[in-house]
Amino acid sequence: MANIILLGPPGAGKGTQARRLVEERGMVQLSTGDMLREAKDSGTEMGNLVADVMAKGQLVTDEIVIGLIEEKLAAGGEGFIFDGFPRTLGQADALGKLLAKMGTKLDAVIEMQVDDEALVARITGRSTCGGCGEVYHDQTKPWPADGKCEKCGSTDVKRRADDNEDSLRTRLMEYYKKTSPLIGYYYHAGDLFTIDGLAEIETVATSIARILDQQE
Ligand code: AP5
């Protein structure tokens, strides 16, 4: 199974598409954002350390996120979807080395292109299910009228502390300054595919499926 990176700014739809790939293809989603939120919610020392940085929309240190990914990769598996990682050139180098050590490699880096205006609407309208993490949106995928998550039946609707216009501004700046150079990095490596992330969720999924089918 292919190993891929979903690359794009906050709200590009990385998590939405990663969850589909887990369901439809049995791939393994590795979201550093989810890992960090889990650490924060369970009040670990590391979680407390990163809470404020995340709420402001800044990046957590390379050392912490590389450590999290290393731990997950050590647990084994195949068909990894890197969602929100790497976000700096240092993280990209580290990922290449970790995969090489495992005798595997990246097959595709999928850049999801969107424009900033659409991101504000996506981020400020987002909610997630506290039970299973299913992603909803007030306009495009509203929480079911019976109040229960369509995937797991939970009634726990969560909104993220960093899903506001102030944090989004910082998150976008961090993306353009530190993460967007990865587009050139992976283009040069011959791994980059670019898709239209502004299209409907189904259409985006079809574009990703087409790229994955080429890798098999
Ligand atoms: P993280 O959790 O990774 O957040 P992010 O990258 O900002 O991305 P998002 O989760 O906000 O967006 P998404 O692209 O997954 O969009 P989604 O599918 O939800 O990181 C959070 C923080 O953790 C960072 O700011 C940083 O502090 C820290 N961090 C994490 N990783 C790090 C790392 N590697 N290094 C350092 N720090 C790190 O979709 C958004 C909304 O749009 C949803 O409501 C959805 O329903 C809707 N939507 C999705 N697709 C479509 C579509 N095609 N059309 C219409 N609506 C859509």
Image: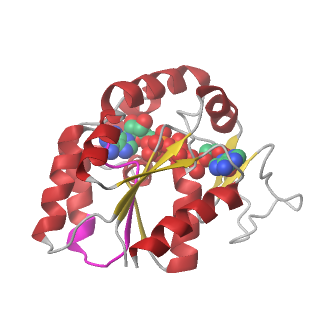
The spot of residue 204 in percent (x, y) is 62, 56
Q: Nearer the viewer, residue 25 or 185?
A: 185
- Quadrant placement of the N terminus: bottom left
Residue that sits furthest to the right in the current view: 145
Residue ID at (15%, 62%): 98
Q: Is residue 52 magenta?
A: no
Left or right placement of residue 96 versus residue 117 in this view: left
Residue ID at (36%, 34%): 180
Q: Nearer the viewer, residue 70 or 49?
A: 70
Residue ID at (35%, 40%): 183
Q: Above or below — where is 29 with respect to 176?
A: below
Question: Residue 185 falls in which quadrant of the image?
Answer: top left
Q: Please provide the residue range marked out in magenta.
A: 72-87
Left or right placement of residue 63 versus residue 119 in this view: left
In this rendering, does residue 131 appear at all? no
The spot of residue 100 in percent (x, y) is 13, 66
The spot of residue 84 in percent (x, y) is 40, 48
- Quadrant placement of the C terminus: bottom left
Residue ID at (23%, 37%): 61
Left or right placement of residue 15 versus residue 59 in this view: right
Q: Above or below — where is 78 with respect to 211?
A: below
Q: Is residue 83 magenta?
A: yes
